[in-house]
Image: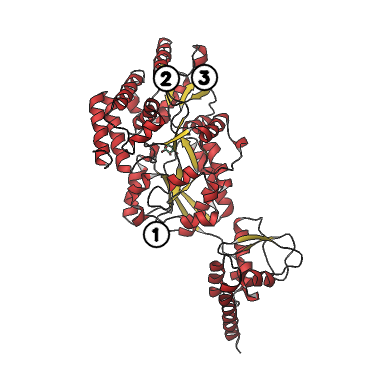
Amino acid sequence: MSRKTLTFVMLLAMLALLVPAASAAPLQQEGQEYTIAKADWLSKLADKYFGSIFAWPAIMAATNQKHLEDSSFARIDNADLIEPGWKIWIPGEAEAEEFLAAYDPGKPELLFGKPAEGQLVVGSWWTAGGEAEGLNGMFGIYKDKYPAVEIVNATVAGGAGTNFKAVLKTRLIGGDPPDTFQLHAGLEVEGYSPEEYLEPLDDIYASEGLEEAFPADLLTMLKAYGGHYWGVPVNIHRSNVLWYNAAVFEANGLTPPADFDEFVTVAEALKAAGITPFVLGTKDGWEAGHIFEDILAGTLGAEGYNGLWTGDTPWTGDGVAQALENFNLMLSYANPDHSAHTWDSAGEFLIAGTGGMMIMGDWTDGWFTSKGFTGYGWAPPPGTQGIFVALSDSFAMPKNAPNADNASNWLKVCGSLEGQEAFNPQKGSICARTDCDPALFNAYLQSAAVDWGQDAIVASVAHGAAAYESWATDYKDVLTLFVASGDVAAAQAGLQQACVDAGICQ
Ligand code: GAL
């Protein structure tokens, strides 16, 4: 018998033994770790897990593949020389079968895994301090595991994805997507026609145990569209935070305002001291919508706010009119050049102490930290005590991603404990996972984690959670006009129309 024929016969034998055993032995769907015990050898394990002593190459190859990404797994050089205590990987049944079907014993190099290579193109809008560092932290973890992969940081600047989202849409439609991209958890995904352009990620949730890693409310939000997971979340952000310059407040004997009346008192005192009371940037067209969602929550309460997105709270009611009045009042204390500022350039006033207060999401905590500024205080914006306006950043995978394997490895890093611990303390967000070490986080983030555990959670509209993208865009556009005009009636009519166009209001 020639060597080639022998190889073929051996392969057939392997498969023949593996397949019938599939129904008899307790075969595993998912892979699992295994620690080598004293009397173990690979064929014995192959027999135990796959019903065939000939399936040992699948275990050897899977373990060596794991070793390339995580050196705590053993590297098996010689199948006959395994040591008690080694951590190995028993592949799932389908993976083992696939390997054995393609395996050629004449090519032993197939037993040694294949390092990931090529590119990983990551699309996001994280260019500001804090968010850029957080992303880099996660890149570091990826690089450790897949050193041969070149990461391309394909950012498009503009907070809340103002510019990024349009660019991405064009790329998806044009069949030229990045390998993975930033996506808010919630209804935002609808804007990308996920059935047509995105991969459902349910398999990654299963293989990585992600349903056990994230809280139930977040899982519901992630599955809100079409019953599939479209993104792997890296964090939880809070939209409703009032940041203040602690030294300025102390020097003027002030404490953060709990309601809108107190806001005016504090703002007047700041104004009298020659300080811009309310620091604002509206350049990118989403910031007014962001602040207003916090004012809506602070005026209507959690339930009233939630009802806006389901049709239970009327946009035509007194509550929304009052919220617009409240916003108008706050705007009267803002820096007049706000349309020339982004959220972070406006934040410079607060750092410099020429500005007193600012309402912005808690990426501001990451930004302050990246600037070495520690003199800030925080409080819920007026009326939002006990309410957590939430959003979450996730990463998604397009259909036909050019480097799909690299993208899927990226999503695994995104969902992992080490990925989230490298990312969030710098990003200024708390982990989406429930098992991150609190000691890694600063005082603000620790307080956010406590609030996330006890507050009423409502969904942000400015950041993709509460409404379809088209409604969220109409909403933000109305608020941008409002900031310029101050016309309460026109804004309320515009908000109602947006709800009608979204098919929620009559
Ligand atoms: C949000 C995003 C945050 C942060 C912020 C400012 O939409 O969820 O992670 O990047 O925009 O750009």
Give the quarter of the figure containing the N terminus.
bottom right
Compared across the picture, whether 45 is left or right of 408 comes to right
For label 3, count other residues whose C-alpha is less than 10 Å away and answer few (under 14), some (14-19) or many (20+): many
Query: What is the image's colouring?
Result: secondary structure
**Closer to the camera in the image, 271 or 438:** 438
Element class at badge 1: loop
Q: CA distance from mark 3 to mark 1?
A: 50 Å
Say whether disc 3 or disc 1 marks the residue closer to the N-terminus: 3
What residue does disc 1 label? Answer: 400
Q: CA distance from mark 2 to mark 3?
A: 19 Å
The mark lying in front, picked from 2 and 3, is 2
Q: Quadrant of ligand 1?
A: top left
**Residue located farthest toward the top when viewing the structure as drawn:** 272
- The kind of residue tagged 2 is Asp
Q: Is residue 93 above or below residue 384?
A: below
Q: CA distance from mark 2 to mark 1?
A: 50 Å
Residue 154 visible here: no
For label 1, count other residues whose C-alpha is less than 10 Å away and answer few (under 14), some (14-19) or many (20+): some
Image disc number at residue 246: 3
Give the quarter of the figure containing the C terminus.
top left
Say which residue appears at 28% left-offset and 40% top-offset: 504
Q: Is residue 65 above or below residue 381?
A: below
Element class at badge 2: loop
What residue does disc 2 label? Answer: 259
**Closer to the camera in the image, 237 or 286:** 237
- The kind of residue tagged 1 is Asn
- The kind of residue tagged 3 is Ala
Q: Find residue 437 and report its image quarter.
A: top right
